[in-house]
Each structure stands twice: as C-alpha cells, then as structure tokens.
Image: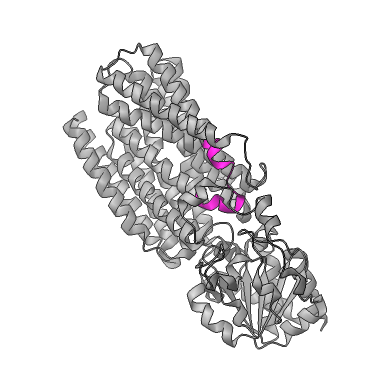
C-alpha cells in the first residue's frame, strides 16, 4: 500500500474510535435526532460528487456525477433541516409556555 | 497564491469541517445544546463543501462549464427537494424520511465509486480497486435496503415480514456473487488474472446489481417494528461507503466523517437491539414474531381480561392523585400525540399530577416518542425515562397504557419467555391500570401480555386516537 493510503487508514481508525466515544455518551432520548444528525454527516459524500463532476469528461461520467450531486445535496440539505426540526422541539421554555397558555384556555371549557 | 498553497488551505478547511462534525455530535449529548450542535455540524458541512468548490475552481485546469453546471444545477435540484421534504414532512413520518435521505446518501457513495472505477479501469492499483469495489457494493446495498425500509415504514410495502420462497438461498447466492466478483476484480487489478476493461465493467455491474438485490432481500423478511434497527445499521453502512470513497479520492474529510458515522451507526444499532433484548444478528435473520406460527401457537390468558367502559375510565383518571401515561408504538401509529396531550392538560387542570413514562424503544425509533410528544407541546420535564419513573409506579393511582405492549409485560422478569430480560416499565405496580388497545392482538414478541390478565387492569378497546378523544370528552362532562 502507498504511504498516502496507510496514513488514510490511520485517520480512518482514529475517527472510528472518536465516533464510538462521542456516541456512547448520548442519552436514549436523543437517539433519533442523533441518528438523523449522523445521517446528514455522511452527506459529506457530496464533496466526492463534486470532485467526480470536476473530473468528468464523457457523457456517462456527466450523468453519474449529476445524479450523485442530486442525491448528495438531498442528503445534506434535507438531513440537516429535518434534524433541526426535531431538536427545535426540545427547547424547554417557549414550548412549556405555549402549552401552559393552551392548557389555561382549555380549562374553562371543562 | 500558488495552487499548492490553496490546496493546503482547502485541506485545513476540510479538517475544520471534520472537527465541526465531531464537536457537533458531541453537543447532541443534551437537549439543551443539541440544536446548536446540529448547526455547528451544518456549518462544518458548508465549510467543507465551500472549500472543495474553491479548490476545484482554482486548481490547474479549473472547472469546465459543464462541470460547474452539473454541480450547481445538481445541488439546486437535490437541495431543493431535500429542503421541501424536510420542511413539509409530518413528524410521525420522519423515520421514513431519514431512511430516504440515507438511501440517497448511499446511492451517491455508490455512484462516486462506480465513476472512479470507470476512470481507473485502465491500470488501477490493487488497494484502490478494493476500496472502489467495496464502496460501490456497500452503497448499493444501502440504497435499495433503505428504500425498502422506508417503504415499509410508509406503508407502501407490507410491514409484516415478507418471505420470498427460497429467499435465504437467493440472499446467500447474491452474497456469494458479490464476493466472487469483488475477488475477481481485485485479482484483475493485481495482475493475477487478465481482465479486459469491458469484462471488469461487467463484473462491477454484477457486483452492484447483486448488492441492490441483496439490499431488498435482506430487508423484506424483517418486520416493520424492527425497521429502526435496520435503518440505523444501513446508516452505518452509508458512512462506511462514504469513507471508502474517501480512500479512493484521498480525501480526509470523507474518511473522517464516514468513519464517524460508521461507528455511530454501529453503536446506535447495538443500543437499539439491546433495548429490545435481541441481538442484531437475530433481527437481521428476520421474521421474529408476527409470523402465523407464533401467533397461533400460544393461546390462553386472554379469557380472563376485564373490559372497562369509557365513563368508568374517565372517572378513575379524573379523581386520581397521580397518573402516569405510558405511550407506545400504537400511539405513534394512530398519531394520537396531540390527543394525549389534550387529555393530560385536562387532568392537570383538575389537579391531577401527570407524568409520561418513556421506554427507550417506545415509538418507532429510540427517542421517537420524545420527539412526537414534544411536537404536541408536552412540557419536556413531564417526560420521564424508564429508570426515573419505575419507582414512581408504586405511588401512582392510575397507569394509562396507550398502544404499548411488550415493554409493559411482567413476564419479562421471569426467565423462559421471549421477552425475558428485556427492561420493562413497572406498570403492574400501579394501583390500577387502564390499557387503551385496539384488540387483544399480541405485541411484537408474539406473546400474551400478563398485564392484561391482572385483576387491577381494565381494557379499553379502541384506536388510540378515538379512545383518547372519547376519554377527554368523558372527563370534560364530569
């Protein structure tokens, strides 16, 4: 193996260990947002799509690169937005206040 | 600035992006910092993508007009579709959307690998060939597997395990084809055998095709309730596929992020499986419960249940000191999270102390129930995790179980039942129990729930949403 590949392998191994450490500390409550967040991170393959687009020089590669761009961009943009929507709901104060006023307006009808 | 210097800065920007991913995931440890963590991660993504664009434009040869058009138009279409879907999706449908995003991510990784293969087909070194073929294979499995998983959650494909005649043999045969194809390609690159570039392409096509079909036959026999574990596993696969693409392109940000997601997905998969007291292997073999055999085999216990009327249940709830609500899969399916919040607020207005007991695997994904209830504006402090709430069942007047089954089955405390050893909510410790359920149908484990035969338990047979609406109306009328 080339030196570059070997040092890539070292980076890969260390990144896996970092991944285990970071993840194992997340409470179960946040597992769904976490999974969605991790899901958006692998959208980084978009960078790979950009590189093959830049190097494309024939119709087959153009098509492959284009579809890869569409897929990658969908993964990245959609992933982050939907994760944000989930996490937004965990904000304590505004949510509690809103629920409180709704509860109050319901009560007289009871 | 010389291109070399620009590349150095771009490389550093990639490292900054990768660091943002790690720190962002770390900040997702708590609900308070979770959102900023995700934003940090998104910022890292913007930096990495922006730096890549700068590098591609400024490097020798630059970016051709066609390439620029592919990048800009492709991003606009994909990003626009992703944005629209993410903004408009209902929170209950969120797991299948995550699955869809996972599918396209895996598809992109496979396409990048396939394109590299075509470019490198004349004399790629052995090591590069290994990563290219692995990337294409893993990406293909993820793509088709995630689409099937999403289809099952969306109801486009039957949620129950689907067995194809000879499915196991087909799956094994596909795996063999994929492995043999991979070996042949690597041998070709090593010069051990001579492959023309056409033969190599056909072989790669075979590997990709068997990967795609393998993804389908792998997920079809797995029941709908197991889909979260499957999606999490496929999520991990996609990360690995992205890392493989990173090896081929010699790109650090792809390798680091891919490995990060590969590890996180693996841990998450194991945690989910543990919470259901099952091994990942057991889930992947599929067909657990839900099959006709399991449903027909055990009878009994069902005869001695006590039914309770809506009005009786309402009186019990309204005059209780404390009520613990146990929401489950059935509540998520019936989309009854708003209905339950309404009932809870009504009870609170009457001075009842209301809490929610959240089992780690309640809903369709770990933590999904928290998201659903948060969406319905249930105050976060009322949501209690299993270990915190279990001692409180002893002091609780009424436990209201809505669409939860196996996670409340006391049989789990004894050895010898399929759910043995699974952590459960101590619902049977409550002074009285009301279960809202559509029928006496069994839960996911395919066994009777002893809780229902408990003399303290009253069964209210109704759809979660309708049952809650009826209860709310009855409490209002008191």
Residue B468, how many percent across, how many down?
74, 70
Image quadrant in which the N terminus of chain B is located: top left
Q: Nearer the viewer, residue B180 or B141?
A: B180
| Left or right of residue B444, residue A3 in this image | left
Residue B285 visible in the snapshot: yes
Across the whole image, how many numbered discs are drawn on residues?
0
Residue A73, how many percent across, how many down?
47, 38
Protein image colouring: one colour
Q: Which residue is found at the position 67% from the left and 77% from the top?
A: B345
Q: Nearer the viewer, residue B383 or B391?
A: B391
Above or below residue B59? Residue A23 is below
Q: Which residue is found at the position 82% from the left and 79% from the top?
A: B311
Q: Which residue is found at the position 71% from the left and 70% from the top?
A: B301
Residue B341 visible in the snapshot: no
Q: Tell me where residue A1 sits by quadrant.
A: top left
Residue B289 drawn in magenta = no
Above or below residue B64? Residue B441 is below
- The chief SS type of the magenta part is helix
Q: Tell me where residue B471 sits by quadrant.
A: bottom right
Residue A38, how many percent across, how many down?
42, 50
Above or below residue B401? Residue B77 is above
Residue B224 drawn in magenta = yes
Q: Which residues are magenta?
A: B215-230
């Amino acid at each position: 193996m080339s030196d570059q590949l070997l040092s890539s392998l070292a980076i890969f191994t260390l990144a896996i260990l970092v991944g285990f450490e970071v993840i194992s500390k997340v409470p179960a409550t946040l597992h769904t947002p976490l999974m969605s967040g991790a899901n958006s991170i692998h959208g980084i393959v978009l960078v790979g799509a950009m590189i093959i687009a830049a190097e494309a020089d024939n119709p087959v590669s153009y098509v492959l690169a284009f579809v890869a761009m569409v897929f990658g961009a969908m993964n990245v943009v959609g992933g982050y937005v939907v994760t944000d929507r989930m996490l937004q709901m965990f904000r304590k104060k505004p949510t509690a206040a809103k629920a409180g006023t709704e509860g109050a307006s319901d009560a007289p009808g009871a | 600035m010389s291109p070399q210097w620009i590349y150095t800065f771009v490389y550093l920007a990639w490292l900054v992006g990768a660091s943002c991913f790690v720190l962002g995931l770390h900040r997702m440890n708590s609900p308070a910092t979770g959102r900023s963590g995700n934003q940090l991660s998104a910022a890292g993504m913007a930096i990495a993508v922006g730096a890549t664009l700068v590098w591609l434009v400024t490097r020798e040869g630059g970016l051709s007009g066609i390439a620029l058009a592919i990048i800009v138009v492709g991003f606009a279409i994909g990003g626009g579709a992703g944005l629209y879907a993410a903004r408009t999706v209902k929170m209950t449908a969120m797991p299948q959307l995550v699955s869809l995003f996972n599918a396209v991510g895996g598809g992109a990784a496979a396409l990048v690998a396939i394109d590299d293969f075509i470019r490198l087909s004349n004399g790629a070194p052995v090591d590069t060939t290994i990563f290219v073929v692995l990337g294409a294979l893993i990406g293909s499995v993820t793509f088709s597997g995630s689409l099937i998983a999403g289809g099952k959650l969306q109801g486009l494909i039957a949620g129950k395990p689907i067995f194809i005649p000879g499915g196991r043999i087909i799956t094994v045969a596909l795996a063999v084809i994929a492995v043999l194809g991979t070996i042949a390609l690597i041998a070709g690159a090593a010069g051990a055998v001579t492959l023309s570039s056409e033969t190599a392409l056909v072989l790669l096509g075979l590997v990709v095709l068997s990967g795609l079909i393998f993804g389908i036959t792998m997920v079809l026999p797995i029941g709908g309730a197991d889909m979260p574990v499957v999606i999490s596993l496929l999520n991990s696969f996609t990360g690995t596929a992205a890392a493989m693409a990173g090896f081929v392109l010699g790109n650090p940000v792809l390798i680091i992020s891919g490995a990060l997601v590969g590890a996180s997905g693996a841990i998450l998969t194991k945690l989910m499986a543990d919470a259901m007291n099952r091994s990942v292997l057991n889930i992947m073999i599929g067909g657990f419960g839900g099959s006709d055999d399991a449903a027909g085999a055990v009878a009994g216990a069902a005869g001695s249940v006590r039914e309770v009327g809506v009005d009786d249940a309402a009186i019990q709830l309204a005059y209780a000191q404390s009520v613990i609500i146990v929401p489950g899969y059935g509540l998520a399916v019936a989309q009854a999270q708003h209905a339950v919040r309404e009932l809870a607020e009504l009870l609170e207005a009457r001075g009842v102390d209301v809490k929610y007991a959240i089992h780690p695997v309640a809903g369709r994904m770990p933590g999904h129930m928290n998201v659903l209830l948060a969406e319905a504006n249930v105050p976060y402090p009322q949501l209690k995790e299993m270990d915190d709430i279990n001692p409180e069942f002893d002091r609780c007047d009424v436990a209201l179980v809505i669409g939860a089954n196996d996670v409340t089955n006391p049989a789990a405390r004894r050895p010898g039942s399929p759910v043995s050893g699974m952590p459960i909510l101590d619902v049977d410790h409550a002074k009285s129990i009301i279960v809202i359920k559509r029928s006496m149908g069994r839960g996911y484990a395919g066994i009777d729930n002893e809780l229902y035969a408990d003399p303290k338990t009253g069964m209210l047979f109704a759809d979660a949403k309708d049952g809650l609406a009826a209860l709310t109306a009855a409490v209002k009328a008191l």
